[in-house]
Amino acid sequence: MSVKKPALKTIFLTGLLVLVPLAITLWVLGLIIGTMDQTLLLLPDEWQPSRLLGMRVPGFGVVVTLAFVFVVGLLAHNFIGQKLVGWWEAILTRIPIVGPLYGSVKQVSDTLLSSSGNAFRKALLVRYPHGESWTIAFLTGAPGGDVVNHLQGEYVSVYVPTTPNPTSGFFLMMKASDVIELDMTVDAALKYIVSMGVVAPAHNPRQQRPGPLL
């Protein structure tokens, strides 16, 4: 008895649904491990794993990288280490071009990586890229500096990520009245964006209106 064509197509698509996420996950992990393995180039030639063990060990750079990060964190966590970091940053900030760049990157990394940081405060629904379409954005704060002198009314700063890579996107300042706060966690919103809308968050009827954005 022959298998019908629709059945063959369904079986093939089922196989793809199983293998594609696995393949992409392994590819990303391989890319990360390969990048971290480049840190082995910083070791002296006589300390290279390939010379000590007589063979190349894939992923050994991950161990070296994690150990290095841990040691740096351990040293910077005590009083002497904090003084050294402060001294190092004071030197960098006085170097033209390097100083402003380092300061900006450090401020962003402190916001994103600090345990007390709050980079993405709330998930929002905004009109973008035109008034007839909607997308998900994240509240990042309020406009500051001289910018507030040129804006009439209450504005908020939002980050509109791209799909499926939310690490790139657009920084916008929008009227607070033009954005809608979503009853959705930031993690759920990020998953929704990365999946290109395929993995939709569960629908939870809102019991009460959210409070002020800021």
Image (spheres, helix red, strand yellow):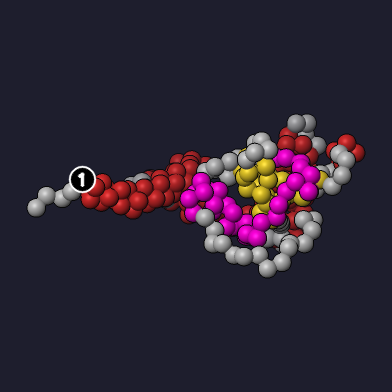
Name which residue lies at 66% across and 54% down. Answer: 123
SS category of the residue bearing label 1: helix
Where on the picture, by quarter, is residue 175?
top right
What's the residue at 80%, 56% (across, down)? 214
* Residue 94 makes an appearance in the image: yes
**Relative to residue 66, is residue 84 drawn left or right?**
right
Q: Which residue is mark 1?
A: 5
Q: Which residues are magenta?
A: 170-199
Residue extending furthest toward the bottom: 207
Percent x, y for residue 109?
68, 48
Would residue 28 be counted in the magenta stretch?
A: no
- Please state the horizontal and vertical placement of residue 68, each as a whole percent of the image: 56, 53
Q: Amino acid at mark 1?
A: Lys
* Residue 186 on image: x %, y %: 63, 56
Q: Residues within 10 Å of mark 1 (few under 14, many from 20)?
A: few
Q: Position of residue 55 (x, y in %)?
A: 33, 47
